[in-house]
Image: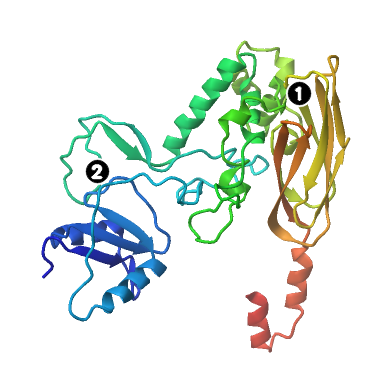
């Protein structure tokens, strides 16, 4: 029988039996343990706990169990001390396991997510009438706190909203699209060790645009992005048309209501990858496609030169024209074109790259490039499989697999 003062080591999977974190907490409370060590494939911090808790992965848990077994005359002692702030010891940022990821199920030609922001264990004010762990289903929590740590996209939202408010105060004439562009094109994709940002859910997976969008938000750089991708009313109308909105419904959404002639949807659906978005996503590249983008110079120098550089997605040739953008007092906006040429046979595989415009000074305008090459002819492969000898069951099974 475990006595008070003991620490419970619990694994989320023991011989095929799954144990949830709630099960582990209930077991620890039942035996009156003072603390819990919970081992799972990928540690998932959930915020405040009813008892002191440490979450570790299976490798660390196995090492701890083997270390415990070396004590033949007793068990190792565990010391619980006060909380200390440890700076730059953990790799950060990382993409939380619960973060919403792409591709978008509604419009795959628009990158999801746009950007990532802090959302794990965020300290914020808390209503005193609400317990710190409401509705946990483990035990009644009667504690009262004025501050609490919470996690989720609901905690990333106020970070981005606050940054947008700062940007708007510095640039009151910028549209929402321009503000989004400033955030996306200046985001960073390296952690504090200058390595690629990792994505939780797999201990070794490097994040991609479907995990972090354009990257992690950088408020300081977003104040002076150099160039922005703005959107006009016609862009939004085209997007709503592609989503299936009627002319009458679009008229209700737009204030002040423009002329009905301006809201007339095209007879055939136009691809959304031609919207003037800060990222470029093509979800079904079967042949050569040319995409148009327009950028506006919002830097301190009205006369500026920007040079392009490209990281090509695997199996895709990328041609940017022109390769140099020239801005002057009389030419604030410049349009460029991106031609994507598939160079491989692939069946629906996404690959990632980027397009960067730089003035070789303080501005580096980066756009994620997401391409799904879909040039593999499944019809011919299926026909060839059916032409094989029907009596050869083994070959038939291999072909079906």
> Secondary structure under badge 1?
strand
Nearer to us in this view, 396 or 122: 122
Question: Measured along the vertical axis of the image, is residue 330 above or below residue 222?
Answer: above
Residue sitting at the far top: 256
Q: Which residue is at a point 44% across and 40% down the rendered structure image?
A: 119
Residue sitting at the far right: 322
Q: Which quadrant holds residue 214?
A: top right
Neighbourhood count class around disc 1 (C-alpha, 10 Å): few under 14, some 14–19, many 20 upward = some
Question: Measured along the vertical axis of the image, is residue 314 above or below residue 338?
Answer: below
Is 257 left, or right, of 149 in this rendering?
Answer: right
From the top left corner, tell me how far across and down residue 70 is, in percent.
Answer: 28, 79
Q: Quadrant of the N terminus?
A: bottom left
Which residue bears the numbered disc 1?
A: 296
Which residue bears the numbered disc 2?
A: 135
Q: Which residue is at a point 68% across and 89% down the rendered structure image?
A: 391
Q: Earlier in the sequence, mark 1 or mark 2?
A: 2
Nearer to us in this view, 210 or 28: 28
User: Which numbered dot is residue 383?
Assistant: none
Nearer to us in this view, 11 or 358: 358
| Residue 86 seen in the current view | yes
From the top left corner, tell me how far across and down residue 384 is, in percent.
Answer: 77, 75
Is 44 left, or right, of 385 in this rendering?
Answer: left
> Secondary structure under badge 2?
loop
| Cα gap from disc 1 to disc 2, whole angstroms | 50 Å
From the top left corner, tell me how far across and down residue 77 is, in percent.
Answer: 21, 66
Question: Measured along the vertical axis of the image, is residue 126 above or below residue 319?
Answer: above
From the top left corner, tell me how far across and down residue 69 is, in percent.
Answer: 27, 78
Q: Which residue is at a point 64% across and 29% down the rendered structure image?
A: 182
Q: How is the image coloured?
A: rainbow
Label 1 with label 2: CB-CB less than 8 Å: no
Q: Nearer the viewer, mark 1 or mark 2?
A: 1
Q: Quadrant of the C terminus?
A: bottom right
């Amino acid at each position: 029988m475990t006595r008070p003062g003991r620490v419970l080591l619990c694994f989320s999977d023991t011989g095929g039996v799954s144990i949830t974190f709630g099960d582990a907490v209930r077991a620890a409370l039942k035996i009156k343990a003072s603390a819990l060590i919970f081992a799972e494939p990928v540690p998932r911090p959930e915020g405040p706990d009813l008892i002191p808790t440490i979450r570790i992965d299976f490798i660390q848990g196995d090492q701890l169990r083997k270390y415990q077994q070396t004590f033949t005359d007793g068990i190792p002692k565990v010391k619980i001390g006060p909380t200390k702030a440890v700076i730059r010891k953990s790799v950060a940022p990382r993409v939380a396991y619960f973060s919403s990821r792409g591709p978008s199920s509604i419009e795959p030609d628009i990158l999801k997510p746009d950007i990532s922001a802090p959302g794990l264990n965020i300290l914020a004010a808390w209503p005193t009438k609400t317990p710190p762990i409401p509705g946990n289903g483990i035990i009644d929590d009667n504690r009262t706190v004025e501050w609490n740590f919470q996690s989720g996209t609901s905690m990333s939202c106020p970070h981005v909203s606050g940054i947008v408010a700062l940007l708007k105060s510095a640039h009151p004439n910028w549209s929402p699209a321009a503000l989004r562009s400033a955030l996306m094109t200046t985001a960073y994709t390296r952690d504090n060790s200058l390595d690629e940002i990792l994505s939780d859910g797999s201990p070794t997976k490097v994040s991609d645009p479907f995990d972090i969008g354009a990257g992690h938000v950088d408020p300081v750089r977003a104040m002076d992005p150099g160039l922005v991708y703005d959107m006009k009313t016609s862009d939004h109308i085209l997007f709503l048309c592609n989503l299936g909105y009627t002319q009458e419904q679009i008229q209700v959404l737009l204030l002040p209501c423009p002329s009905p002639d301006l809201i007339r949807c095209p007879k055939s659906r136009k691809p959304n990858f031609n919207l003037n978005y800060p990222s470029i996503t093509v979800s079904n590249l079967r042949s050569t496609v040319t995409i148009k983008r327009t950028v506006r110079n919002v830097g301190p120098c009205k006369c500026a030169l920007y040079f392009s550089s490209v990281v090509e997605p695997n199996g895709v040739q990328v041609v940017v024209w022109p390769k140099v953008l020239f801005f002057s007092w009389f030419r604030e906006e410049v349009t460029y074109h991106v031609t994507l040429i598939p160079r491989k046979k692939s069946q629906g595989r996404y690959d990632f790259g980027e397009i960067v415009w730089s003035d070789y000074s303080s501005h580096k305008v980066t756009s994620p490039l997401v391409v799904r090459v879909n040039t593999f002819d499944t019809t011919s492969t299926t026909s060839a499989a059916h032409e094989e000898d029907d009596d050869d069951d083994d070959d038939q099974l291999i072909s079906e697999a």
